[in-house]
Amino acid sequence: MSTEKGSIAVQTENIFPIIKKFLYSDHEIFLRELVSNAVDATQKLQKVASVGEFKGELGDLTIQISSNKKEKTITISDKGIGMTADEVRQYINQVAFSSAQHFLDKYKGVEDGGNIIGHFGLGFYSAFMVSEHVTIRTKSWKDEPAVQWDCDGSPEYTLTEIEKEDRGTDIILKINDESKEFNKKERVEELLKKYCSFLPVPIQYGTKEETYTEEGDDKEKKRKVANIINNPKPAWTKKPADLSDDDYKAFYNELYPYSVPPLFSIHLNVDYPFNLTGILYFPKIKQNYEIQKNKIQLYSNQVFVTDEVKEIVPEWLTLLHGVIDSPDIPLNVSRSYLQSDPNVKKINSYITKKVADKLKSLFKKDREEFEKQWENISVIVKYGMLTDDKFYDKSKDFLLLENTDGQYFTIDEYKAKIEAQQTDKDKNLIALYTHSVEEHHVYIDAAVGRGYDVLKVDSVIDNHFISYLENKIEGMQFKRVDADTIDKLIDKDEKAESVLNEEEQNNVKAYFEAVMNKQAATVVLTPLSPNDNPVSITKPEFMRRMQEMNQMQGMDFAGTMPEMYNLVVNTNHPLITDILKSDEAERNEKIKQLHDLALLSQGMLKGNELSAFVKRSYGLI
């Protein structure tokens, strides 16, 4: 038995401090890299066996992970291809010479040769981020002696022939004091589940206890079984034809335990001009869509990389959940960050197209069911349109607009509907909308009473989306139902004559202006039906939208400038006629009460004004 001493051939002077501090962004990924290497070794053995070079028994290829808190060690053991002494010198001592790349070059053109995980040759050295000493015990599948390699984190190593019964490699890490968190069994299992849940070779971490009953005996018993922490054949690696709806739902539950079931899924599977597989799910979106983001997991050959996928997936599709797996996505040496690459843009476009095609097919196949799901789908579709004009072109035919009666229309259908309602063809079509049916009930009732339709737009991004649609739909404007549009919507033939003469109308306007804050409010006299409200508040649509968008961006000017609005006075209402007959004190009190009622209906009466209104109302009673 011989022992060899030497220095590791490195291409950068004193590489270990660089590895420990700068090469990897997060020290916890050492376990991912070492387990990935074990998977590589196992797959290499399967490959040489499949081409007839290895003729022995493969046996149980489960990768074993163990930890010893007392000894401060973590051991990763595989029964893969193993290494000879020369291979240890080549692959371990010569940093940055990738054994995986060498293997791929040798078996180039052989089917499935591309599923070897390692590409950088530095994965093993991540062990020194957390270890004060690393030992490799390895026996090759070839008929050569087993060897042991030891290194304490300096460029010096020892290589010794040893006795080892089983083929494969054991990596033994002596955890350093700065990394003692990894001595805890719970922490190791957490990392294994995070990074290795779907690796293609079974991975065992100790044992776990399970209950069972024997046939003919109802009494529960307990036993120790292998704690397999991964699913080697996740749903996205299978063909869509081999999966049922229940399979897709079960996989979603595997990714997100105890979550609300998704609406539907999209199976991604492309091998040209890039390789990509995966399953994306449409979740049930809540109003606060920000908390729904970053639920897509990125994998490279079933190795978890990150859940920050905005470079791969368009930002609006980060609302989806699921998995994307691609060996063609470029990663830096630690597999932690995406780099700019043409493939990323191609993948981005492909996913956008697949989502649009899926939604379009669902709409055409069963519109009724599509409408039932629209509340949850709409935020994603609208978000996509706002951020990607190409997606608007792909999806405008299945974008749905919902009215306050719960009816759904495509853009073309709704244009035809309001064209039939609005007979003044010289003006733009006006689509009325509300963000709150309860808050705008009075206005909706008045509009519907005249035969007009009102859209319900109450999602978190609709303020922006309404403005966006106006730029996209020629000849059509959107006005909130409480906006200053009442004259625009009343037909010339329908419009009532005022019961007040010109002098009386001038007096009414003067009386209201004398009581109100003329800096904030404008009095507008309009002859409506006696059944309509005597006064109502409307707001300039443009100013209101600007204010709401500023508030969304954290710029609220309400404290520095009064809110602009119109007070619409219905000159045909009996109360307005009665005001003309009252003395000045009674008239001012009635006008103040009517004005405050109108403000109250819009949620605009606050503070001292609200308190005064309540006291005045008690007095009137």
Image (tube, grey):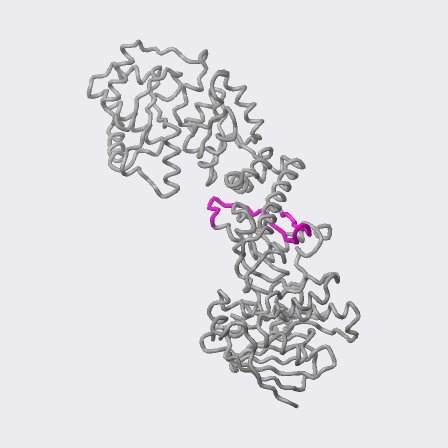
Note whether 314 is above or below 584 in the view shown.
below
Can residue 210 be seen in the rendering of this structure?
no
Note whether 447 is above or below 115 in the view shown.
above
- Residue 95 position, x and y percent, is 57, 73
In the displayed structure image, the side of residue 107 where residue 482 appears, left or right: left
Note whether 190 is above or below 560 in the view shown.
below
Q: Residue at x 78, y 68 (%)?
A: 51
In which quadrant is the N terminus drawn?
Answer: bottom right
In the displayed structure image, the side of residue 217 where residue 380 appears, left or right: left
Q: Quick one: 14 or 250, which is closer to the camera?
A: 14
Q: Residue at x 65, y 72 (%)?
A: 63
- Residue 516 position, x and y percent, is 25, 25
Q: Quick one: 369 or 614, which is closer to the camera?
A: 369
Q: What are the residue bounds of the magenta stretch?
A: 265-290
Which of the 4 image quadrants contains residue 171? bottom right
- Residue 153 position, x and y percent, is 51, 79
- Residue 337 position, x and y percent, is 52, 59
Whether 281 is among the magenta residues is yes
Residue lying at the far top in this picture: please name it: 501
